[in-house]
Image: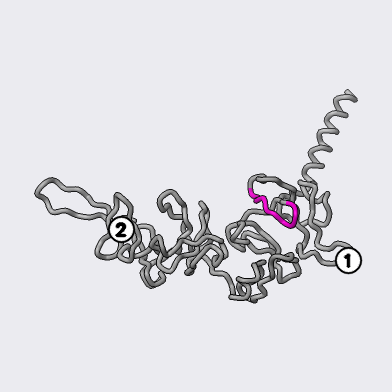
Amino acid sequence: MKKRLAIILAVLLAIFACAEKDDKPIGAACEEKKDCDSGLCFQQERWGESTGWTGGYCSDKCTESCSRGAECIEIGENSYCMASCVRDSDCRGGYLCNPSVRACLPDCREGWDCGDAYVCDEDAEDGGYCVDEDSSASGQKNDLGEPCDGDDECLSDYCLPDSSGWTDGMCSMESDVCPENFLGTLINVFNLCLPLCDNADDCREGYLCNPLINVCLPDCRNGWDCGQVLKCGNDGFCFLPVFQKIGEPGEFESAL
């Protein structure tokens, strides 16, 4: 009987211990390593000085990949798991969603060191990211949907070039989940984040609001390739021919 009571007591203690333990995944706040599930905490202060990791940050070392919900990011000479994100609102206060790596990193305006190769963009509204000196000197990198001549001009480091029919280029990103006001759209074999729209006024010059999916796509009359199946219509949209019986008038059904 005593043995049975001892077993029950041990089980109850284990249950209470688990209930009291806080879940501290990658990206959670911490003060020391025991606060994190991974056992690694980037502390807010070390030796009395701020590190820029606001509220501390639970992380883990990695080589190529991390557990679900985290990205393996190179920081200094090592790589660490950082919380995944799509937009800034996915991150805790003091952190921004870096579009280049899609991970929550410290806002460098609050003291995080960008290292020797980068400088902090101090812009009050759109800054907080570590950028190379050239892009800092020329101004803020372009956000999704804005024009670009190359990947280095986009915060996402992904530019759809003018040479492929994207008028003046368009900053985008490949993702199944896109930021607010953007929609993942399958173009060829790539799922691209493109600007949402209600009408042509919502799109940049050279782009039309496709009524089927409500995203801004290039005007095919300006050189965008509709592919082998679709054809460019007189209104700038790509159309899918609908074949009729011989002798009947041909019709077209709107498509991408």
Q: Is 222 drawn above or below residue 7 in the view shown?
A: below
Q: Is 133 drawn above or below residue 92 in the view shown?
A: below
Q: Residue 245: image x %, image y %?
A: 13, 46
Q: Is 252 drawn above or below residue 245 in the view shown?
A: below
Q: Residue 144: image x %, image y %?
A: 51, 65
Is residue 74 found inside the magenta-colored segment of the image? yes
Instruction: Specify few, some or many for label 1: CA neighbours under 10 Å numbering under 14, 14-19, or 20 or more.
Output: few
Q: Mark 2 and 1 residues: CB-CB less than 8 Å, in contact?
A: no
Residue 210 horizontal side relative to residue 76, left or right: left
Q: Residue 169: image x %, image y %?
A: 45, 66
Query: In the rendered image, which residue does mark 1 sit on?
Result: 48
Identity of the residue drawn at 45% across and 62% down: 161
Mark 2 residue type = Cys
Is residue 22 found inside the magenta-colored segment of the image? no
Q: Is 201 drawn above or below residue 152 in the view shown?
A: below
Q: Residue 222: image x %, image y %?
A: 33, 66
The residue lying toward the viewer, choosing from 18 and 186, is 186
Magenta span of residues: 69-78
Circle 1 SS class: loop
Q: Which mark is residue 238?
A: 2
